[in-house]
Image: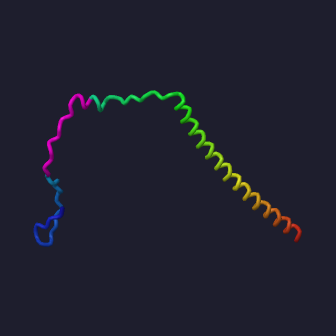
Amino acid sequence: MIEEPARGTFIRSAIRPVKTKEAPATQPTMKDEAQMTAPIQKQPRKPMEILSELAVRCKSLADEIETAALEIDEYVSAKDVDSGKLKQLQALLKGLT
């Protein structure tokens, strides 16, 4: 907050928080604290559920592998075409000499 005690002089002062009316905070009871600190227990999974989740993850991983293989194949094919053009140019240059 900036104040002007005299004309042309400015002073920075600390900002004071605005007091608002708030509802009084309630104290947590022992029961509430016990519920907050108690670990959440998970239900044991069935073996078929585990296998099903693994199968889904394997399927998505297989899809990603297939996509990567196709991209690599395209990259190698493009490089082979460029390499073939370079070899043709080299042969042409050797024929000129």
Pick whichever, 17 or 48, lies toward us.
48
Q: Is residue 38 left or right of residue 83?
A: left
Name which residue lies at 52% across and 32% down. 49
Pick whichever, 95 or 61, lies toward us.
61
Q: Is residue 30 magenta?
A: yes
Q: Is residue 76 left or right of residue 56?
A: right
Tell me the quadrant of the picture where the N terminus can be found. Answer: bottom left
Q: Main secondary structure of the magenta part?
A: loop
Residue 90, image x and y in percent?
83, 65
Name which residue lies at 17% across and 40% down. 25
Is residue 40 positioned above or below 1 on the image? above
Res. 11 image quadrant:
bottom left
Q: Is residue 39 magenta?
A: no
Name which residue lies at 17% across and 53% down. 17
Residue 23, image x and y in percent?
15, 45
Res. 6 image quadrant:
bottom left
Tell me the quadrant of the picture where the C terminus can be found. Answer: bottom right
Res. 58 image quadrant:
top right
Is residue 91 positioned above or below 50 on the image? below
Is residue 70 positioned above or below 58 on the image? below
Highlighted range, magenta:
20-33
Q: Is residue 43 left or right of residue 85?
A: left
Name which residue lies at 18% across and 56% down. 15
Residue 52, image x and y in percent?
55, 34
Q: Is residue 29 left or right of residue 66?
A: left
Q: How many numbered markers are drawn? A: 0
Which color scheme did the rendering employ for the protein? rainbow
Is residue 50 positioned above or below 25 on the image? above
